[in-house]
Image (cartoon, helix red, strand yellow):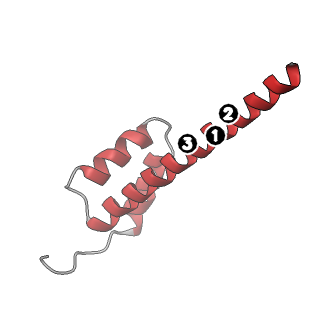
């Protein structure tokens, strides 16, 4: 390690949050910022954590839909 890096400015965080609010672009930018190697460590770690939360959420939603569809199918028979 080279020592402490300069913290990310509030304006940069605001721009980051704005970009992450755009559908589809957010997923691409999370990968670019998280694994590109050119961003500050705190921003890269934030992006990696966000991707993990998105994956967990997708699995939960998928399981929820399976349970709902199974319930509907059971009710139809």
Work out whether mark 3 precedes mark 2 in sequence or the reverse, and give the earlier one: 3
Count of picture labels: 3
Dot 2, crowdedness within 10 Å: few (<14), some or many (≥20)?
few
Q: Nearer the viewer, mark 3 or mark 2?
A: 2
In which quadrant of the rendered image does the C terminus lie? top right
Residue of label 2: 66
Residue 7 placement (x, y as % from top left): 31, 74
Image x and y of residue 58, in percent: 55, 42
Position above or below: 11 against 68: below
Residue 15 falls in image quadrant: bottom left
Residue drawn at x 51%, y 46% is: 21
Front-most of residues 6 and 49: 49
Q: Which mark is residue 63?
A: 1
Residue that label 3 marks:
58
Q: Are marks 3 and 2 in contact (CB under 8 Å)?
A: no
Give x and y (percent) for residue 61.
63, 41
């Amino acid at each position: 390690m080279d020592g402490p890096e300069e913290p990310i400015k509030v304006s940069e965080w605001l721009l980051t949050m704005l970009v992450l609010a755009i559908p589809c672009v957010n997923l691409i930018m999370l990968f670019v910022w998280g694994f590109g190697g050119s961003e500050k460590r705190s921003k890269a770690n934030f992006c990696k954590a966000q991707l993990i939360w998105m994956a967990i959420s997708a699995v939960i939603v998928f399981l929820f839909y399976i349970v709902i569809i199974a319930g509907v199918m059971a009710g139809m028979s």
